[in-house]
Amino acid sequence: MKQLNEIESPPTASDSAGKLGEALVHDLDTGIEEAVFDALSVGDTDQVRVLVEELHFSDIADLLERLDDDHRATLVEILRVNFDPDILPDLDESVREQVIELLGVDVFAAALAELDSDDAVEVLEELDEEDQKQVLDAIPDGDRQLIEEGLSYPEDSAGRLMQRELVTVPTFWTVGDTIDYLRKSAEQEANPLPDHFYSVYVVDPKHRPVGEVHLDTLLRSKRPINLLDIMASDLKQIPVTTDQEDVAFLFRQRDLASAPVVDDAGRLVGVVTIDDIVDVIDEEHEEDIMRLGGVRETDLYEAALNTTKARFSWLVINLLTAILASSVISLFDATISQMVALAVLMPIVASMGGNAATQTLTVAVRALAMKEITATNAGRLIGKELLVGAINGCLFALLAGGVAWFWFDSSALGAVIAMAMVVNMMVAGLAGTTIPIYLDKNNIDPAIASSVFITTITDVVGFFVFLGLAALFLI
Amino acid sequence: MKQLNEIESPPTASDSAGKLGEALVHDLDTGIEEAVFDALSVGDTDQVRVLVEELHFSDIADLLERLDDDHRATLVEILRVNFDPDILPDLDESVREQVIELLGVDVFAAALAELDSDDAVEVLEELDEEDQKQVLDAIPDGDRQLIEEGLSYPEDSAGRLMQRELVTVPTFWTVGDTIDYLRKSAEQEANPLPDHFYSVYVVDPKHRPVGEVHLDTLLRSKRPINLLDIMASDLKQIPVTTDQEDVAFLFRQRDLASAPVVDDAGRLVGVVTIDDIVDVIDEEHEEDIMRLGGVRETDLYEAALNTTKARFSWLVINLLTAILASSVISLFDATISQMVALAVLMPIVASMGGNAATQTLTVAVRALAMKEITATNAGRLIGKELLVGAINGCLFALLAGGVAWFWFDSSALGAVIAMAMVVNMMVAGLAGTTIPIYLDKNNIDPAIASSVFITTITDVVGFFVFLGLAALFLI
């Protein structure tokens, strides 16, 4: 009992800790943002510089995103000297483009050369070909090669995602050899170690990975112990061209912290770590939710005109489907002119079907994204949704039928809307599952089967069945 | 140029590596699932045992989810001896409940005791109070205390998420002291070290964290070096009651791999690692996408009757809003009976507004979830969406007006639908942003403002403006 009470009303002491946490987590919000904004508005450059100096690069990135175009340009001017390159990967795409333009090719290229190769590739891959070439030309040879190599892997592949810097050791080394090597490397001027790493990889003479030793394993083992005896050898090796969504799925499925990436010959070429996966998961989510909502991509920071253009194409499709639904209604215009109640009630049938279909679609799209629907259970799922549609269809047939009867004092009208409701809700369950599953089977993103398409079906069926039955039985 | 060519048509060698990756990532799909299914169908228990023995626990969890009830019960019977406790946290909630019931309290309690405390809490928190108590009573004292402690933190807090097992060292230790301690601890029978860890935490005598030493830093430093000299002291400390979404935001924002959790007195009580955060991010996203789609939670594996019940309440709300929209239409029944074309065209106005509003809503809800909308840019965002609505409204006014004019040979009808379109698209932009922002400000999940509510507004406004203008100008 006790802990449950605590769950519902946490004691005041931990409550204040919660607020502390809130402040800690959102520390950019607490005044600094507005202070920078105010200083920018009055043109107090020195004050802005002082305020920004203390900020973490990801907070500066947030700040740049939230400012309007003029203030953003001013802030970039202030940041230009000693520009922190880590700001770039954290920026939203459309803001990043603007910042890059403001910085100019030379400053941008210098910043890029300072980034880790995977981050540099991530920033550069969004630019168009010509801009890429111009920037690459301004980058020193060594860095340029690493970045070009990264860009040579397919978009959204493990090769683009992986970090090339990693620690490899031969099979015959001991714990002591490895620790000595790490200490010695750290002392060298051209330090070959990555900034951070979680494992060392044991490779054979052909540079193929044979095992992985987590750093904590290394630390709890005595110096003379052979790496072969403590390494984990059940490595999940990721081919370099694997799609990043599959990589993310593997990480989730196996609770991995990192995984080695190999080329066609099985040679170790890099390592993917879980923090890169978090970005992939966020991207994936964004794609799903945006497509379901009929938006191509997040356009929060886009200019109004670009946003209008992007949304327009989707709305054109909707206009066509709406005209299709209207033409179904126009088949029955004679019926409607005899009984206007039909025009009043027909949106109810369509809307209920549309919402039931959206519910089913959402569950199906999410399950497909999580790879939870397979050949063995797809049929069962469709059957279940059909059943759910049938049961809810009967329940809402009673409710809507009752409302129609009471409202227009016609039991026949109630019966017609009730029948149409059952049919449309079952169609909703069927279309909401079969269409995304069919698209997924044909390697089309099922989220594209957004409400627009599914609700077209329920609109057309809803209007047709309701008005058709009315024409048959009521007129 | 070269790398861009490669992006579009990767060479065949890497293509086959991609397929290898596909097979590797989805290895449960390739035959094993169907083989188990077939063996279960013919009742060949031994064959099932052989097939399942080789599987990773997360694959067994997937398998259990995908089977129907009867086969699932048979498989649980087969797995009962030496039941792998790690299967439990990986199961979907409704399947897990069923598996727990099949296992019985004693086997389940034994499995729970073997899990890490945070996993055990995760499994147990989903059960109802009575079942929790029954299971806790069957767990040995020491394990039970740890689990009860975990359950005492608020739901969805850092305390529930964190791992209690961690490595702390005093401020006066050197690298050598730490390595010796880790080696000695690993030898002890009651090994106090966690299974895996990425950092050691330096704590003061009051057990408050003062710094963190990443394991790679420890490994590249010489033995006599003091931890105080190499530790990272800019720790982001997370109060134990912080909401898990805020914790996830912090991890993303700062690219953290792990972070210390402290109690009210600032004492180190646990550590949150990035792999726990991946689950939180998935959960969060699931919540957003489901709420936007008008589903309370994923119900893929729920029985049809439970699913029906859960969806019913949402559809009831939709029925009420649909009746509201219908009553707006009924205000104009005299107008419609004089001009049936209005009934044919009115769904176009409503549907375009509804879809434009859903687009805006989706972008706003996602941006709010990512904490990208703040006091400084909210007004600008609303203004932008209003502008987007106005521009697209004018464009679709021309298109829909043209269609109406052509279809019903009436320029006046075209003008009326054009005006209604502009108004409704602007309302869509306004409602799609202000409503989620308002809800978020009042600490209500903005995703709950799902299409159902937003489209009610665009339905009501669309019908009212279109039919109202028609009544004024056409009749």
Image (cartoon, coloured by chain):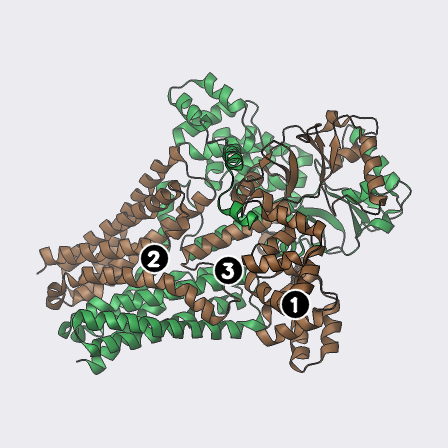
Chain colours: A brown, B green
- Residues at discs 3 and 1 both on one chain: no
Pointer 3 indicates a residue of which chain? B
Pointer 1 indicates a residue of which chain? A
Q: Are marks 3 and 1 in contact (CB under 8 Å)?
A: no
Give the CA separation, mark 3 to mark 2: 19 Å
Say whether residue A54 is visible. yes
Name the residue that disc number 3 marks.
B366
Which one is nearer the viewer's eye here, B468 or B381?
A: B381
What quarter of the picture does the C terminus of chain B occupy? bottom left
Name the residue that disc number 2 marks.
A452
Q: Amino acid at mark 2?
A: Val
Viewed as shown, does residue A193 lie left or right of B5? Answer: right
Which one is nearer the viewer's eye here, A144 or B395?
A: A144
Q: Are marks 3 and 2 in contact (CB under 8 Å)?
A: no
Name the residue that disc number 1 marks.
A103
Q: Are marks 2 and 1 in contact (CB under 8 Å)?
A: no
**What residue is at 44 percent from the left and 75 percent from the top?**
B387
**Mark 2 or mark 1: whose residue is earlier in sequence:** 1
Q: Residues within 10 Å of mark 3 (few under 14, many from 20)?
A: many
Question: x and y percent of residue B211 in the render?
Answer: 80, 51
**What residue is at 71 percent from the left and 49 percent from the top?**
A142
Pointer 2 indicates a residue of which chain? A
Q: Nearer the viewer, mark 3 or mark 1?
A: 1
